[in-house]
Image: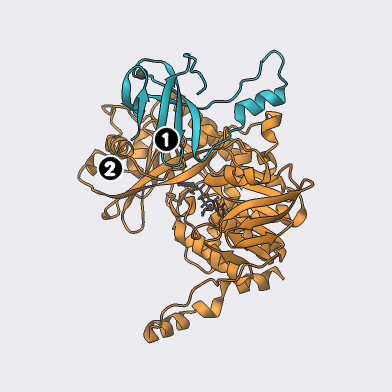
Amino acid sequence: MADTRRAGARGSARYSALALLRHGVVSHAWPPVWRSHDLKRRYQVVIIGGGIHGLATAYYLARNHGITDVAVLDKGYLGGGGSGRNTAILRSNYLTPEGVRFYDRSLELYQGLAADLNFNVMFSRRGHLTLAHSDASLRTMRWRAEVNKVSGVDSEVIGPEEVKRLVPRMDVSDQARYPILGALYHPPGGIVRHDAVVWGYARAADHLGAHLHQDTEVTGIDVSAGRVTGVRTSRGDVATPLVINATAGWATLVADMAGVRLPVQTFPLQAAVTEPVKPFLRTVVVSGTLHVYVSQTARGELVFGASVDPFASYSTRGSLEFTEGLAGHVLQLMPSLTKLRLLRQWAGLCDMTPDFAPIMGHTDVDGFLVDVGWGTYGFKAGPVAGEAMAACVATGSAPEIISSFGLDRFARGQLVGEKGAAAVGH
Amino acid sequence: MILLPCPWCGPRDSDEFGYIGEIGARPDPRTTTPEEWRDYLYMRRNVAGWTTERWYHRMGCRRYLTVERNTISNQVRSATDAAVQVDEP
Ligand SMILES: Cc1cc2nc3c(=O)[nH]c(=O)nc-3n(C[C@H](O)[C@H](O)[C@H](O)COP(=O)(O)OP(=O)(O)OC[C@H]3O[C@@H](n4cnc5c(N)ncnc54)[C@H](O)[C@@H]3O)c2cc1C
Ligand SMILES: [Zn+2]
């Protein structure tokens, strides 16, 4: 039965080679790939936030559990939040066993995603390097490598010569300001085309029956006797017994509407991209000490990122401090990039948690679920989070794979401690 | 870039300051429960709009400041020395 639904998600005939050719020749405007609807007065499930998390949840609700009376509400456009602004690095070499297991399941889903959604998400496994510039970070790398291996994740500490072999442009000399002592090498890591993932999930969720509503802002959540009864939106009220908060940077504002408090602070994270050049950088390179990371897209642009801005904010304006710092740090790693020009820079909002781990599952308000705390690392988690949140809704309890990520862990003092693997390398 | 009007040093680039964050009421560690203490440690109001927060002028007067800032526009309304009592208006 799952298989017939899966075939449905592919919408196969519509995108067969023949159909594409015919369409190309006749050259009509392409039809929209997802529909628009009137907002119904009632849904079985309302998902707030049309980023990768909300859309993946809607998709797996339909595909794995047959739950299709679902609305995804977004105040802007689908993928207009962090999902359309991230640097799309995928990896599973985390520090805690619960983190490694979780992100590795996501990589597994990413691996088959293009076929599953019948949408080329351009997942490209290039290997992921986290550089160590000090004995302390080399020690953390060894620790991570051991935790990774125990969970069956390919991850190894390598020396500077090996780093040079993987990235010939890198300055691995001991003359550098922060010499490279080694690196954690994670061959399965890579990059993906973020917009394609969002559109692929949107199209597949729509195809299976979910209603995607853009330009629909949630302004209130009705709770009566400790239970969710509905949401208020800019397009009218909707009755529903089940609401999922998947609004990342805005998570606190939506949780406030239900009277649920979160240990989240919103920080902007910036990124930048250069003009395209010939391919020379295969691996993703991250330096925690230099607060910078870089990868080269299929188009040839270099994509740069850093740590979050120094103070909390809901503003998505870029800053000159960021570009200056970034350029200086990138050039320390690869001095030959000095003539490359930056094309653009941008910022997105990140919902940072105290332990750099997500917050998922039920809350004290019946029917109000959260899938938040995605900080700077949540894009890679989209598939597994969608799968787990869908299971949460269908079975009424959090599946084992997210059992460490509940909101109640903060009151119990049982934090996850993922900072060592998530602060700069997203 | 934003400028913070330090009461001792005048308007200075925010890069000179350390951001401490939201000001929360600290429970008395001798009488508080672990749950209350963790609530104080971890929970945040994460206000979108005007809020009052703590900054530290690490490259200037090295004083802790109370700053009123709008977290949507990053506009700053006031900065006063945290140790100097300001009368309520
Ligand atoms: C510059 C940058 C680089 C990053 N790099 C990486 C990376 O390399 N790898 C990685 O794994 N992660 C990365 N991330 C993090 C990642 O982008 C996010 O964690 C992830 O996209 C979160 O997805 P989401 O679906 O939860 O939220 P979002 O995509 O942010 O979607 C939330 C949606 O909620 C909507 N919304 C908010 N409030 C309301 C409301 N009241 N009513 C209706 N809708 C509302 C918003 O409009 C938005 O579309 C990066 C982030 C940034 C900013
Ligand atoms: Zn000062």
> According to the rendering, which colour does chain B have?
cyan
SS assignment at label 1:
strand
Mark 2 residue CB less than 8 A from any atom of ligand 1: no
Quadrant in which the N terminus of chain A is drawn: bottom right
At a point 70% along the width and 49% down the height, the residue shown is A368
Residue A102 appears at what percent x and percent y? 61, 46
Relative side of A224 to A201, left or right: right
Residue type at mark 1: give it: Ala
Give the crowd class for mark 1: few <14, some 14-19, many >=20 residues within 10 Å.
many
SS assignment at label 2:
loop
Q: How many marks?
A: 2
Residue A205 appears at what percent x and percent y? 60, 66
Residue A36's image quarter?
bottom right
Which color scheme does this rendered protein use?
Answer: by chain
- Discs 2, 1: same chain: yes
Disc 2 designates what residue?
A: A169
Question: In the rendered image of this protein, does residue A307 appear above or below residue A60?
Answer: above
Question: In the rendered image of this protein, does residue B32 appear above or below residue A315?
Answer: above
> According to the rendering, which colour does chain A have?
orange
Residue type at mark 2: give it: Arg
Task: Tell me which label, 2 or 1, sits earlier in the chain.
Answer: 2
Q: Residue A183 shows which numbered tag?
A: 1
